[in-house]
Image (spheres, rainbow, N blue to C red):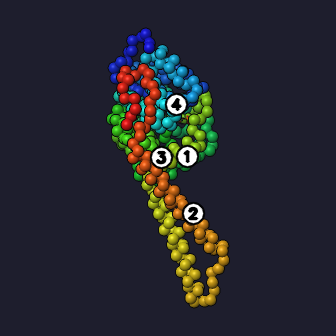
Amino acid sequence: MSEEPDPFSTRPHISVVVPCYNEEEVIEQTIVQLVAFSQALPNKTVEIIFVDDGSQDRTLDCLKHAAMRHPFIRILTFARNFGHQIAVTAGIDAASGDAVALIDADLQDPPEVLLEMITNWEAGYDVVYGVRSTREGESAFKISTARWFYRILNRLSETPIPLDTGDFRLMDRKVVDVLCNMPERHRFVRGLVAWAGYRQLALPYDRKKRAAGTSKYPLRKMLRFAADGILSFSSKPLQIATNLGIFSASLALIGIIYALVLRISTNIWVEGWTALMIAVLFFGGVQLISLGIIGEYIGRIYEETKGRPLYIVRERIGFETEDEMTKP
Ligand code: UDP
Ligand code: MG
């Protein structure tokens, strides 16, 4: 591939994992910045793993071009779009560094902050995660829904999950090994890392606006992502369904007793279609909500038991070993 000898043929100190999906507008800029960052790190070897999550645009061409110029750039390409969290997982699985950093391809997470993360990692922290103190260039809708989401998630979750935290982080090999050994498929990576424990440090930073291109998270993907976070880290929705059932059944019981008492002690009837319909609709609604919640969990159990591979790698470029094309 490249003429120059690979200076990083031994195990790298830092692996940087970058998930990319249709990022042709920004990827060249990202490559330049990440390469500059890697070369400026004193006494550290770096590998950069770009995971191309089934892009249909020129993203992969740009990446291949960069990999020819820089031996420390590696590329995994997926056979189709598997989603952000799976792309991150594949990158983590393929990383061989003593520490692994996760960063988005759109330069919203500034590479300079990685320096500070590395310093803290060297000082003994096993995970240094970025907390978004400000968010620039995102819609009020996105910012407020994200704000609410993290607070509700934290309320419901059995594991405390840090607020306003994305996947931008640096993790020690110990933590990476824990993640690699988690077979679950609906992956909410930031939650899995929180679950792992060890010494974790929150590092506030200002999240920039996208350097170019548009968000690859439409509302549909955002909702799926939020559901993954809540359903994977909490079984409280099931309790909420039960409580809702108890609450509505109690209401009905009060109504029945009221009607009976009226009937026995007076000769007034509780009458009318309206009362009946309201009761029927109310119970129908409660039952459907509860069934839906139970269905979500059963769906997940079904997915887990199928045991399909989490992703299919089409190509591995720049890695030393060409084995292990899929992960069970
Ligand atoms: N991404 C991906 N697969 C997807 C969607 C997104 O790999 O199906 C990547 C995307 O290229 C980016 C990161 O995930 O590097 C975060 O996505 P984006 O910036 O669009 O999300 P936002 O910042 O708008 O929440
Ligand atoms: Mg982004």
Q: The disc labelled 2 sits on which kind of residue? A: Gly
Q: Earlier in the sequence, mark 3 or mark 2?
A: 3
Question: In the image, what residue type sits under mark 1?
Answer: Leu
Whether residue 26 is visible to the viewer of this picture, yes or no, is no
Q: Earlier in the sequence, mark 1 or mark 3?
A: 1
Q: Find residue 229 and name its label.
A: 3
Residue identifier under label 4? 54
Quadrant where the C terminus is found in the figure:
top left
Q: Position of residue 121 (x, y in %)?
A: 38, 32
Looking at the rendered structure, the kind of residue marked 4 is: Gly
The Cα–Cα distance between marks 3 and 2, rounded to whole angstroms, is: 25 Å
Q: Nearer the viewer, residue 106 or 75?
A: 75
Q: Amino acid at mark 3?
A: Gly
Q: Are marks 1 and 3 in contact (CB under 8 Å)?
A: no
Q: CA distance from mark 4 to mark 3?
A: 23 Å
Q: Residues within 10 Å of mark 4 (few under 14, many from 20)?
A: many
Q: For residue 311, which numbered disc appears in the image?
A: none
Q: Quadrant of the N terminus?
A: top left
Q: Is residue 52 above or below residue 219?
A: above
**Which mark's residue is nearer the viewer, 1 or 2?**
2
Within 10 angstroms of label 3, few (less than 14), some, or many (20 or more) residues? Answer: many
Q: Are marks 1 and 4 in contact (CB under 8 Å)?
A: no
Mark 1 → mark 4, Cα distance in angstroms: 21 Å
The tag earlier along the polypeptide, 2 or 4, is: 4
Please tell me whether residue 59 is drawn above or below residue 1 in the rendered image. below
Q: Which residue is mark 2?
A: 285
Per the image, the residue denoted by label 1 is 223
